[in-house]
Image (cartoon, grey):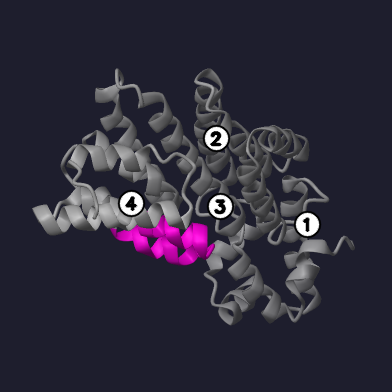
Amino acid sequence: MIEEYTKTQLLDSFFNLGGNHNSESIVKMQEKFIKYINTHGYDRQISDVLIVSTMYVEEAKFNNFKKSHKIVLPIITRAINSIHEFDLYDIRILATVLGHAKDYNQSCLLGEKLLKSLEKYSDDINYPRIKAAIHTNIATMLLRSNYYDIITSYEDLKNEFLKHIDIAIELCEKENFNDFIGTNIVRKGLFLGDFNIVDKGLDFAKNINDKIYSILLDEVNEYSSHIQFSITEPQLRSRIIKNIKRYRKYRDMSIEMLANKSGISLSFLVYIENGKRFPSIYNLFKIAKVLDISVDTILNDEGE
């Protein structure tokens, strides 16, 4: 027999789970959400939390981040298109899923809407934690954009990332949110390609929470599968640009020919070779295929 709870009690108990997002605790919460809906009918916020809890199960039990992303994307899309202001529960729900936005533009757009709505609740006890979560999740999306698919110039991306991550770190240190300090320091180090900063964040996390430390190690390993750490980020960018140009000319291929054969727009390739844009891993594979070389060669060849 599941005890009867009010909507406020259910939502508060969900957000008070903290880092206890194991599948067993989440399934127990889901039973309460379903009972509430069966008793009182559909409620959007309870339904949203039920969806978010399903996302947690996928991540905790199956480590399935791609599926969890698809699960919560409709919530994010609806929120971006909403003309209504968000109440505190809406903000907390959306802050939780912000890191699963479609891309960093979507994340920044929704994040700014949340921060604006949050200011009405500056006296709430949870205000600092929610604000830190919003800035952290925006920065997380910007980090992913940095090594997956650059859409704007690196300097714009860098400035936006540092703004959000530094606010998140400052808030976490001020409020003693120790579980999140190491996370944000590691992500700052990854973005900047500075492994002294990464090591500092890992050391901090290891002394605070073994689970978070393990998750951060996975993030570092994921990053390393896309970007080589033995050189700085600007050096890597320079090497990629040089190798694309060098092998294109070696194949006696004009930039127009490379564009036609790779399916990448000529203007974007011009931006790449001028250092104004940076290709995603996907585009690197397309370029490498046309040039008849491996992506590893583009990343690692130091020849002149």
Q: Are marks 2 and 4 in contact (CB under 8 Å)?
A: no
Label 2 – label 4 distance at C-alpha: 40 Å
Q: Which residue position holds label 2? A: 159
Segment tinted magenta in the rendering: 53-74
When the figure is inspected, residue 253 is found, relative to residue 97, above or below; the finding is below
Q: Which residue position holds label 3? A: 144
Q: Amino acid at mark 1?
A: Arg
Give how far across and how far down residue 80 sits, in percent: 27, 49
Please give left or right for residue 151 compared with residue 25 in the image. Answer: right
Mark 2 and mark 4 lie on one chain; the one further toward the N terminus is 4
Q: Residue 239, labelled with which disc?
A: 1
Near mark 2 (Cα within 10 A), the count class, few <14, some 14-19 or many ≥20, is few
* Residue drawn at x 26%, y 52% as measured from the top left: 32
Q: Secondary structure at mark 1?
A: helix
Near mark 1 (Cα within 10 A), the count class, few <14, some 14-19 or many ≥20, is some
* Residue drawn at x 74%, y 65% as measured from the top left: 245
Mark 3 and mark 1 lie on one chain; the one further toward the N terminus is 3
When the figure is inspected, residue 135 is found, relative to residue 261, above or below; the finding is above
Label 3 – label 4 distance at C-alpha: 31 Å
Label 1 – label 4 distance at C-alpha: 51 Å
The residue lying toward the viewer, choosing from 159 and 274, is 159
When the figure is inspected, residue 280 is found, relative to residue 140, above or below; the finding is below
Label 3 – label 1 distance at C-alpha: 21 Å
Q: Amino acid at mark 2?
A: Asn
Q: Are marks 3 and 4 in contact (CB under 8 Å)?
A: no
When the figure is inspected, residue 40 is found, relative to residue 264, above or below; the finding is above
